[in-house]
């Protein structure tokens, strides 16, 4: 892997204001925020798949959307190659977005059922005026369909979404993002809606494209087992913060943060002879509004000490490339 | 003791003048104190099996042939009025969407008490006492029986649904994707709870999910469905470790794992057949790498290849399947 950074994120925050209650509106009162993403740093290197994992509400999707500026960050810097994204104006943003793409979880919602596959896949080219004539458009569409293995492409180009399966629809969505020859893709739970065997096909396709075009992905998933099979590195988030990051096998084989340990121990494995013990955590993940002082995992942590109450742990490198935010790890 | 016996069950749906052969000749049984995991991809008919047992098929659904015995009682021919009597009391069902299982404008406790008043003819006070006990049983604060569904988290709502399913002391609980919408840590807690209750009350549990990892960890015996048919049935370790059907082996291989060596994930080219006109011969032959002419011509029957380990494949036991 190279050290060339496709994306460099520093101090990223996204706070959503909470609507005040009636009495607070009249008498004033403190404005509260949902601290969905609360100060995170990470880099995505050229040609890698970086997985962002965590449970619902940990801020992984907000992170993904904020780095593309689909939602505006509250604070922080996001650099794509050398360009600072957070300060771009509309026109500049539109241009740069042709090189950054996103694949969503539910292709049924994303793809317009009234458009043919050809128009769906060709749309990004037309919108951005990147083709001069109909023939060129058609060629590019067929080429993209071939790349995502929708063959024969001429046949698929004529179809509509209701004539395709979930796996095929997700391929159309991938073709749509490939056609602009972008180098960076955000994939937000792209296979969660699909059956296991189709999942593998899509995951294999994405890793093939990664190698073929030297694509870089930020891959969002709640499924740490799936992350192991697609990612090079992994970031684990909890309540808007990164608790651990590192090479994927290191983190899965030797997790350092008590939260990561619990998370991995609770992932079921397809083997009835694997006798595993689930680490039970107290309570459930709270909403990131009134967060505790110190470490935000402390109320659920069995190893918490006095220090964890007072001081928020910072990420530190414990082994090469393997970082953890825990005083006791 | 057998709580549930399903014998040659076939269930069809009428769809625009055509027949969908959703469940085709399925047989299995579940003992008291046993979890039977029924797995398969979307559309394979696993939920239709559950709905047939509960007799809650939609209007266009019909049990065409077969027998279903629940706690010794034949369920298939029962009138709706008679079927109402066994629901909740002999068998109850937990659904995937904890969100929509409760009426959002009624208190959770009231909704469970309603079942008890209706089914067990409990008076109000007795019913509420029982609801409090049930809440405790599933790990909810008894004081929360006055809460509304939106005041519960996803995990708590799933616990309340389990409490409701237990209310009338059923012999069988059907859990249809009970943890699919939940985060893994809560998922683990709910699965532990189900296991604890199963042991305590000697329940038969039919666990339905597409997630073979959940099936592997929670089931005593396992059935693998494909295109409406049961391809393989046996104890969990045999089905996972000595799979006999090519579909089972491939499907297991498609599931990623956080333990052990990282191997290449399997996939099965093609898509399941259309159940309006299922293929002649073995339903899996179009996607099976081992298919020969007999597979295209004759549908394989279910054979017991090893003790208690059944399979529907002409070449079971002779194939070199991925492990």
Image: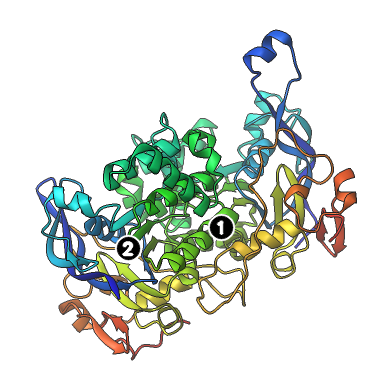
Residue at 23 percent across and 71 percent down: it is B5
Q: Quadrant of the C terminus of chain A?
A: bottom right
Q: Say which chain tag 2 marks.
A: B
Q: Which mark is residue A191?
A: none
Gap in Å between the C-alphas at discs 2 and 1? 22 Å
For the residue pair B47 and A67, the one nearer the viewer reads as B47
Q: Residue B323 at what x, y percent from top left?
A: 48, 82
Q: Quadrant of the N terminus of chain A?
A: bottom right
**Coloured how?**
rainbow
Position of residue A145 in the picture relative to residue A310 (left or right): left
Q: Which residue is mark 1?
A: B189
Q: Say which chain tag 1 marks.
A: B
For the question of whether residue A179 can be seen, the reply is no
Residue at 61 percent across and 56 percent down: it is A213
| Residue A264 lies in quadrant | bottom right
For the residue pair B252 and B28, the one nearer the viewer reads as B28
Of badges 2 and 1, nearer the viewer stands 2
Secondary structure of residue under mark 1: helix
Q: Which residue is mark 2?
A: B171
Q: Residue B304 at what x, y percent from top left?
A: 27, 86
Above or below, A63 against B302 in this view is above
Earlier in the chain: of badge 2 and badge 1, it is 2
């Amino acid at each position: 892997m190279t050290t060339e950074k496709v994306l460099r994120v520093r101090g990223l925050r996204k706070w959503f204001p909470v609507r005040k209650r009636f009495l607070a509106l009249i008498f004033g009162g403190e404005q509260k925020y949902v601290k969905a993403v609360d100060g995170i740093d990470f880099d995505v290197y050229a040609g890698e798949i970086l997985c962002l994992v965590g449970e619902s509400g940990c801020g992984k999707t907000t992170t993904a959307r904020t780095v593309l500026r689909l939602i505006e960050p509250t604070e922080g810097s996001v650099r794509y190659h050398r360009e600072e994204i957070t300060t771009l104006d509309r026109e500049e943003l539109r241009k740069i977005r042709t090189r950054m793409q996103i694949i969503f979880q539910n292709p049924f919602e994303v793809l317009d059922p009234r458009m043919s596959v050809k128009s769906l896949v060709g749309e990004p080219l037309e919108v951005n005026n990147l083709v001069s004539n109909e023939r060129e458009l058609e060629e590019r569409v067929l080429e993209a369909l071939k790349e995502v293995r929708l063959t024969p492409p001429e046949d698929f180009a004529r179809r509509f979404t209701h004539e395709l399966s979930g796996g095929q629809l997700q391929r159309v969505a991938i073709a749509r993002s490939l056609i602009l020859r972008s180098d960076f893709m955000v994939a937000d739970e792209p296979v969660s809606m699909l059956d296991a065997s189709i999942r593998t096909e899509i995951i294999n396709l994405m890793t093939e494209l990664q190698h073929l075009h030297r694509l870089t992905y930020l891959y969002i998933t709640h499924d740490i087992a799936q992350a192991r099979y697609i990612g090079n590195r992994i970031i684990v988030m909890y309540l808007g913060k990164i608790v651990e990051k590192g090479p994927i096998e290191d983190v899965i084989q030797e997790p350092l943060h008590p939260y990561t340990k619990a998370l991995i121990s609770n992932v079921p494995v397809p083997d009835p002879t694997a006798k595993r013990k689930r680490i039970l955590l107290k309570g459930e993940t709270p909403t990131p509004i009134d967060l505790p002082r110190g470490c935000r995992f402390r109320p659920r942590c069995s190893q918490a000490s006095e220090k964890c109450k007072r001081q928020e742990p910072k990420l530190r490198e414990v082994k090469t490339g393997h970082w953890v935010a825990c005083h006791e790890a | 003791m057998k709580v549930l016996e399903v014998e040659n069950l076939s269930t069809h749906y009428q769809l625009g003048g055509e027949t969908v052969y959703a469940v085709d000749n399925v047989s299995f049984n579940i003992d008291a104190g046993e979890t039977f995991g029924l797995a398969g991809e979307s559309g394979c008919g696993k939920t239709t099996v559950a709905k047939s047992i509960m007799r809650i098929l939609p209007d266009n659904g019909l049990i065409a042939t077969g027998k279903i015995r629940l706690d010794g009682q034949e369920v298939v021919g029962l009138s709706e009025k008679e079927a109402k009597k066994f629901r909740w009391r002999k068998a109850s069902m937990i659904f995937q969407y904890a969100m929509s299982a409760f009426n959002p404008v009624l208190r959770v406790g009231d909704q469970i008490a309603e079942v008890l008043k209706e089914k067990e003819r409990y008076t109000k006070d007795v019913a509420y006492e029982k609801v409090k006990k049930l809440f405790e049983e599933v790990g909810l604060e008894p004081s929360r029986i006055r809460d509304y569904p939106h005041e519960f988290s996803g995990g708590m709502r799933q616990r309340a649904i389990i409490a409701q399913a237990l209310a009338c002391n059923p012999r069988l609980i059907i859990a249809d994707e009970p943890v699919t919408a939940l985060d893994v840590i809560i998922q683990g807690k709910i699965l532990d709870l189900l296991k604890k209750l199963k042991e305590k009350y000697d329940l038969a549990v039919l666990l339905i999910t597409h997630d073979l990892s959940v099936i592997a960890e929670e089931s005593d015996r396992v059935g693998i469905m494909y295109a409406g048919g049961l391809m393989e049935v046996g104890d969990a370790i045999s089905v996972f470790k000595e799979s006999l059907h090519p579909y089972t082996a491939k499907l297991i291989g498609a599931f990623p794992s956080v333990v052990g060596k990282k191997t290449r994930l399997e996939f099965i080219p093609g898509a399941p057949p259309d159940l309006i006109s299922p293929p002649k011969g073995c339903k899996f032959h179009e996607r099976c790498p081992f298919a020969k002419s007999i597979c295209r011509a004759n549908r394989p029957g279910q054979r017991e290849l090893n003790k208690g380990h059944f399979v529907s494949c002409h070449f079971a036991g002779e194939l070199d399947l991925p492990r």
